[in-house]
Amino acid sequence: MDKRVILHVGLHKTGTTFLQERVFPALPGVRFVHPLHEPRPGDGPIEAFFLEMFFRNAAHIDVAAHRARIHDWLAGVPEPTVLVSSEAIVGWPVENHSNFRVNADLLAELFPAAQVILVTRRQDKWVESAYSQVLKAGFSTSIERYLNFRDGRFGRYNIGLYHGPNVDARDLDWGMFDAHYRRRFGEQAVLTLPFELFIADGHEFLRRLYAFMELGEDARVFPDTEERVNTSWSPLAASVARLVNKVPMPVKRALRDRLGKGWHPANLVSETVDRLRPESALSKGKGKKFLPPELGEQLMSLHRENNRRLGERIAVDLSAYGY
């Protein structure tokens, strides 16, 4: 397999949609593959493998057979680089990224010489954005329940249908994600960058990305990184969504299935709330957060030392971004 294979693995809520829509498809000499969570006409063998990786029991995945089909497909790809991007590679955030290691190990078995791009985000900001996504998906839960925060302490992840989406706050140590990728793919085969660099200086973020990919100056694209896609709801809209999400799930699914994804009750009500708010109220509400300040500080204190060690490993002063 003489192609360079690069895996952009997430995290969720770190500008992945922008990269997948505005950057990766525009890179000359790069075949961009974006596996989704359902089969599509025209899917190739990489997408087929990812569907099994995401949804099958790993014991039933024939990696050798997938490798042979992908090898044959790569032989017909004219571009020297294949870039595969899916934030689901790091695992499902509503399930504590529990399939992170299975996915990483399967991909290392399939593409042992691949390079990995990981984008992190401050834990408190990531939690707020991920929690907003939980509400968008139709769940009704508090941010404390999502974090398993009780009696002043973070508890373990709870498996089970009735607890709903949740995480173990201890497991939001992105340094462990970075370290495992380096063990499986090689110390120099992993680029980890903070999402905050993308926000502060999008072009510098892209320059580091392109240097890692060894793209020449003529192959680099620099779209307007101030454009936002897949944005979160405002705290007020999300609070309304949480109430609307108490509507029984069969009713919500029936509406969505009959009228389309955009007709989810929480989606309709929350977007209407944001549209009806006066501009002055919108600007005043920008500073309001889902995460109570004291809970956010406790979360960041939990990871301060972890973040310092990660910053040293990737040669980025993460404390400059509040990590």
Image (spheres, helix red, strand yellow):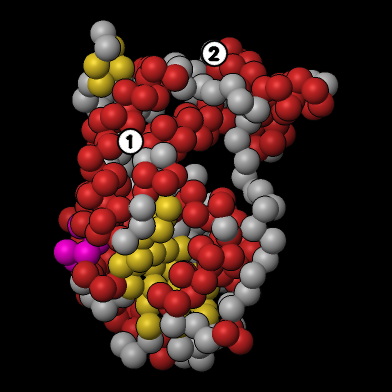
One can see residue 254 in this view: no
Residue at 37% x, 48% y: name it.
318
Q: Which quadrant: the N terminus?
A: bottom left
**Mark 1 residue type:** Glu
Farthest residue to the top: give it: 151
Q: Position of residue 243 (x, y in %)?
A: 58, 12
Reading the image, the residue beneath label 2 is 246
Q: Position of residue 185 (x, y in %)?
A: 23, 70
Classify residue 163 as left or right of residue 222: left
Real-space Cα separation, disc 2 to disc 1, in angstroms: 21 Å
What SS does tag 2 mark? loop
Q: Nearer the viewer, residue 130 or 264?
A: 130
Reading the image, the residue beneath label 1 is 95
Q: Position of residue 14 (x, y in %)?
A: 49, 49
Crowding around mark 1 (Cα neighbors within 10 Å: few <14, some 14 to 19, many 20+) is: some
Magenta-highlighted residues = 180-184
Q: Is residue 109 magenta?
A: no
